[in-house]
Image (cartoon, helix red, strand yellow):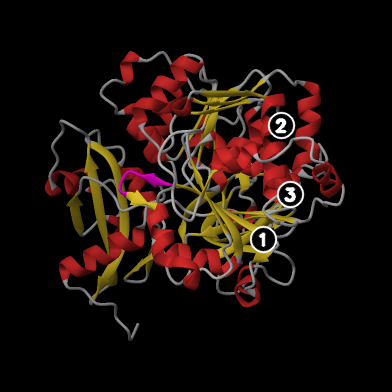
Amino acid sequence: MLIQPRVAHARGATQPPLIEQTIPAFFDAMVARQPDHPALVSRHQDRRYSYRELQRASRQLAGALLGLDLAPGDRIGIWSHNNAEWVLMQLATAQVGLVLVNINPAYRTAEVEYALNKVGCKALVTMARFKTSDYLSMLRELGPARLPQLRHIVWIDEAGQGADEPGARRFSELLASGRADDARIDAIAATLKPRDAINIQFTSGTTGFPKGATLTHRNILNNGYFIGEAMKLTPADRLCIPVPLYHCFGMVLGNLACFTHGSTIVYPNDAFDPLTVLETVQAERCTGLHGVPTMFIAELDHPRFGEFDLSTLRTGIMAGSPCPIEVMKRVVSDMHMEQVTIAYGMTETSPVSCQSSTDTPLDRRVSTVGQVQPHLEVKIVDPETGRTAATGAAGELCTRGYSVMLGYWEDEAKTREAIDAEGWMHTGDLATMDDEGYVNIVGRIKDMVIRGGENIYPREIEEFLYRMPQVQDVQVVGVPDRKYGEELAAWIIVKPGQALTEDEVRAFCKGQIAHYKVPRYIRFVPAFPMTVTGKIQKFKIREAMKDELGLQEDKTA
């Protein structure tokens, strides 16, 4: 008898119901419940806010922004690493219907020019400088001629410190110009709707110009809430957030997960530094910690790791790129994060579609990205036919539900490419789903390697090589090959104090994985090319290998 295979399609729970409020309405209700509870600790700025203090400061900023002749629907950019000003901007813009545009701090002149003009920013709040980046100098270089819609530049200062900057206003002065009791604030708030656009985030495309994913109150407020639910957050939790706020990881999985549960946000530093993370977790008695795998690796392997008491930790999220199983085990055992969760998503879906919970069995937490979130649907489809795949079969992961963005800002063609007529967001990720609905990401459609007709998923080989005790991190890519179409190349970061050779790697593989999965090219490197959010740029590894080996793509294939 033929047994019909189960199809890879899952729906999330329908309880608790979706929040049908705006961000300021929900936040005000939380403030009313616990006005004196700690809301924000910004360690590097030595600043602390209760929920009531944060509400007052963000309303004061909202009034000041209205004083710049900004109106609901206008776009205002934020170009900054993590600080109290960032979260004040997040709350203030939502309060009066301004669309906050997140600008990547790694952007340089041409990129920021493109982003600000693409969405028509009328105002920009920016850091003055950070390390080797001079943000105000870049803006002066562009000038009004190349930024015709930008009317206001505000630089983030420590009140009363530093020389004035020509053509820009101090943030401290702007804030002082506003009033928390400005009658316009509540009048505007009463007109806002949950489905209004409130945030634009540029997706870090590997080719072409970045696209502006446009998100609503309903998108990100609900996603933050259900992320916090999966972590079992309560007002007793203090979440250390070293991931960047300009990205959904910091802004939604961090800030909004906390605000929707009355928890305390803790910023250890403006940009990631493993030592300040460890110091902050101990000093602030943090119960949660977020990070991409490379951040957790840097913390675990820091020479002073053993000096810090991390026993208050219980939960957090690891996301951004696939988590090596061995790293996950160390996070649970050495960092006390028995209830760490894995989250998967993309900017266009607010971002999380799938997440493990605090009680997901460890073997599922280390080998999958959990199950579909409440009020969402996910399915795996055959990239060639578009049909829903059977459970266990690899295909493209698609998401549908409240979390899907409004679209790419003023780019109807790209929006239609990404979201089909039935409302499914096509992620471009290759995944499988088991009979219990657990999803496993096996790579990007573009990353799948076809060697001599065999489909190879680099993630599988990476997980295998992580078992070598000398390997700290590894990335596997496909490179062109005349005979087989593609061959595998592995870049390996060796643990400090360890040594490893190509022959030892091949010997480790022999008899353990199929011969065609053994990387032909092995290189030992000090670091991987990455985005500022910690996503490894495999396309740059591929390009570097092609250049080194003098390889060309076979255009006839």
Q: Which mark is residue 217?
A: 3
Q: Earlier in the sequence, mark 2 or mark 1?
A: 1
Three-letter residue code for mark 1? Leu
The magenta region covers 128-132
Determine which residue is flagged by label 1: 2
Estimate how packed mark 3 is, as few (under 14), some (14 to 19) or many (20 or more) residues with alpha carbons within 10 Å: many
Q: Nearer the viewer, residue 478 or 93?
A: 93
- Which mark is on residue 55? 2
Q: Amino acid at mark 2?
A: Gln
Give residue 7's position: percent from left, percent from top.
67, 57
Return the mark for residue 376: none
Q: Nearer the viewer, mark 3 or mark 1?
A: 3
390 or 359: which is nearer to us? Answer: 359
Magenta stretch secondary structure, dominant: loop
Would you say 522 lies left or right of 128 here?
Answer: left
Examine the rendering and report whether any part of residue 414 can be seen: yes
Mark 2 vs mark 1: in front: 2
User: In the rendering, at what x and y percent does residue 370 appear?
Assistant: 59, 41
Q: CA distance from mark 2 to mark 1?
A: 62 Å
